[in-house]
Amino acid sequence: MSYIVTEGNVVANAALRETHGGKAVANAVIRVDMRVRNEDGSYSDGPTSDYEITVFGKPAESFAASATRGARVFAAGELSVERYNDQDGASHLRRRIVAEHHGVSTHFAPAASRRRNGDQ
């Protein structure tokens, strides 16, 4: 497996559930857009890649609350890639990241801060 750091937009709100052992797990898909430099020096949209992000344990709850549709997030962790065939027989790649580090990106917009336990 490989380690990856990536940033993209959440496709749909993250789903939070529990494993059979009672451990929290959150899943979301992020879409990463590539930018391609043209011969004249300008940039245009290139191909996109989707990554399934999985977060385990207590951090899964925070991730699920932050990873809402359209949010810009980053994730860093172990990457696995598998090939599968859909019902029509077409071949696809599934990219999964088990994220050790994750958060809301402030690259294009400020992140909203939430205080806990009445902290000032």
Image: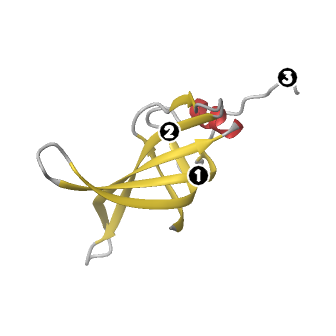
Q: Which mark is residue 99?
A: 1
Q: Kindly report the distance in space between the C-alpha atoms of the residues bearing marks 3 and 2.
A: 27 Å
Q: Mark 1 vs mark 3: which is more N-terminal?
A: 1
* For residue 106, above or below residue 34: above
Q: Position of residue 88 (x, y in %)?
A: 11, 45
**Residue picked out by circle 3:** 117
Q: Nearer the viewer, mark 3 or mark 2?
A: 2
Q: Position of residue 93 (x, y in %)?
A: 30, 57
Q: Quadrant of residue 24?
A: top right
* For residue 113, above or below residue 30: above
Q: Kindly report the distance in space between the C-alpha atoms of the residues bearing marks 2 and 1.
A: 10 Å
Q: Amino acid at mark 3?
A: Asn
Q: Nearer the viewer, residue 39 or 11?
A: 11
Q: Which mark is residue 27?
A: 2
Q: Mark 2 vs mark 1: which is more N-terminal?
A: 2
Mark 2 nearby-residue class (10 Å; few <14, some 14–19, many ≥20)? many
Q: Residue at x 24, y 55 (%)?
A: 92
Secondary structure under the numbered disc 2 in the rendered image: strand
Q: Is residue 88 left or right of residue 22?
A: left
| Outermost left residue | 88
Mark 3 nearby-residue class (10 Å; few <14, some 14–19, many ≥20)? few
Mark 1 nearby-residue class (10 Å; few <14, some 14–19, many ≥20)? many
Secondary structure under the numbered disc 1 in the rendered image: strand
Q: Amino acid at mark 2?
A: Asn
Secondary structure under the numbered disc 3 in the rendered image: loop
